[in-house]
């Protein structure tokens, strides 16, 4: 299966503007980061990694924390 095609199909099905959601997590693949150029893609990668780390630390401190 072509992961890129699946991402595009899912965005179309859900009416998601690709640049409005610059980070995508794909089951069994990991994350994909999007941007208008390489620098913005790297920026989104760093932001996404920081958010994931914050989530990990939150769940370590409180396993019952909600992901609202």
Image: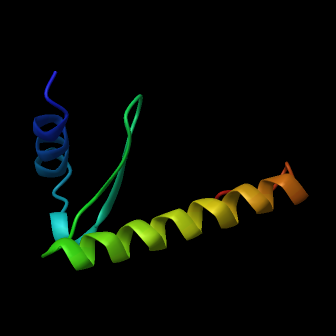
Residue 24 is left or right of residue 36, and the answer is right
Q: In the rendered image of this protein, does residue 19 appear above or below residue 64?
A: below
Q: Quadrant of residue 30?
A: top left
User: Could you tell me if residue 47 is visible in this image?
Assistant: yes
**Tag count:** 0
The residue that appears at 28% across and 67% down in the rendered structure is 22
In the rendering, at what x and y percent does residue 37 appear?
14, 75
In the rendering, at what x and y percent does residue 49 appear?
52, 63
Quadrant of the image for the C terminus? bottom right
Residue 65 is left or right of residue 10, and the answer is right
Residue 19 is left or right of residue 59, and the answer is left
Quadrant of the image for the N terminus? top left
Residue projecting furthest to the top = 1
In the rendering, at what x and y percent does residue 13 appear?
15, 45
Residue 61 is left or right of residue 16, and the answer is right
Q: In the rendered image of this protein, does residue 57 appear above or below residue 20?
A: above
Q: Quadrant of residue 56?
A: bottom right
In the rendering, at what x and y percent does residue 27 appear?
41, 33
Q: In the rendered image of this protein, does residue 22 appear above or below residue 63?
A: below
The residue that appears at 39% across and 66% down in the rendered structure is 45
The residue that appears at 47% across and 65% down in the rendered structure is 48
Residue projecting furthest to the right = 61
User: Could you tell me if residue 68 is visible in this image?
Assistant: no
């Amino acid at each position: 299966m072509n992961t890129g095609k699946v991402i595009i199909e899912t965005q179309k099905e859900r009416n998601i503007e690709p640049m409005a959601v610059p980070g995508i997590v794909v089951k069994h693949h990991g994350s994909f980061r999007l941007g208008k150029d390489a620098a913005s893609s790297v920026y989104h990668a760093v932001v996404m990694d920081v958010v994931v780390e914050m989530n990990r630390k939150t769940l370590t401190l409180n396993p019952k924390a909600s992901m609202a």
